[in-house]
Amino acid sequence: KLSGGEKQRIAIARAMSQEPKILLADEPVASLDPELAWQVMGVLARIAREDGVLTLINIHQVDLAKRFADRLVGIAQGVVVFDGTPAELDDDALNRIYRFDQRAAEAGLLTA
């Protein structure tokens, strides 16, 4: 039986077999433990760097995004509220990105 990380790497390999110019990954590490998440993000980073494939990743793990991304775009309620480098992502930017969720949670509008 394949692990979650192995399944993700196989999915990436299948996508790359098509020789894409752009690779879109929607939450590629969402269900993985931190070590496997790091490995999968490393694979995606190598693809972007070594194969020259534009790689767009939707991810909510800020630490991984800051470590592996060249550019970050933060969206809140459909509006771009941050567009910059990982070094530019500070607490103010994070507040702009996540404040809508925090307000909804405080108002009791979000459920687990």
Image (cartoon, helix red, strand yellow):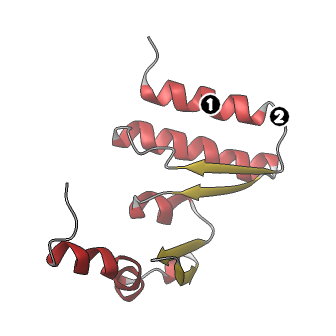
- Spot occupied by residue 33 in the image (x, y as percentages of width and height): 34, 38
User: Which corner quadrant holds the N terminus?
Assistant: top left
What secondary structure is found at the residue carrying circle 1?
Answer: helix
Up/down of 60 relative to 5, above or below = below
**Where on the picture, by quarter, is residue 102?**
bottom left
Ranked by sequence position, the earlier of labels 1 and 2 is 1
Left or right of 56 on screen, residue 102: left
Q: Which mark is residue 26?
A: none
Outermost residue to the top: 1
Left or right of 81 on screen, residue 13: right
Residue depicted at 24% across the width and 81% down the height: 103
Residue on which the image places disc 1: 11
| Residue type of the residue flagged with mark 1 | Ala
Question: Disc 1, disc 2: CB below 8 Å?
Answer: no
Residue on which the image places disc 2: 18
**Where on the picture, by quarter, is residue 109?**
bottom left
Residue depicted at 46% across the width and 80% down the height: 89
- Spot occupied by residue 72 in the image (x, y as percentages of width and height): 56, 72
Q: Residues within 10 Å of mark 2 (few under 14, many from 20)?
A: few
Residue depicted at 49% across the width and 49% down the height: 27
- Spot occupied by residue 54 in the image (x, y as percentages of width and height): 75, 57
- Spot occupied by residue 15 in the image (x, y as percentages of width and height): 72, 35
Q: How many marks?
A: 2
Up/down of 14 relative to 98, above or below = above
Left or right of 39 on screen, residue 44: right
| Residue type of the residue flagged with mark 2 | Gln
What secondary structure is found at the residue carrying circle 2?
Answer: loop
Up/down of 108 relative to 42, above or below = below
Q: CA distance from mark 1 to mark 2?
A: 12 Å
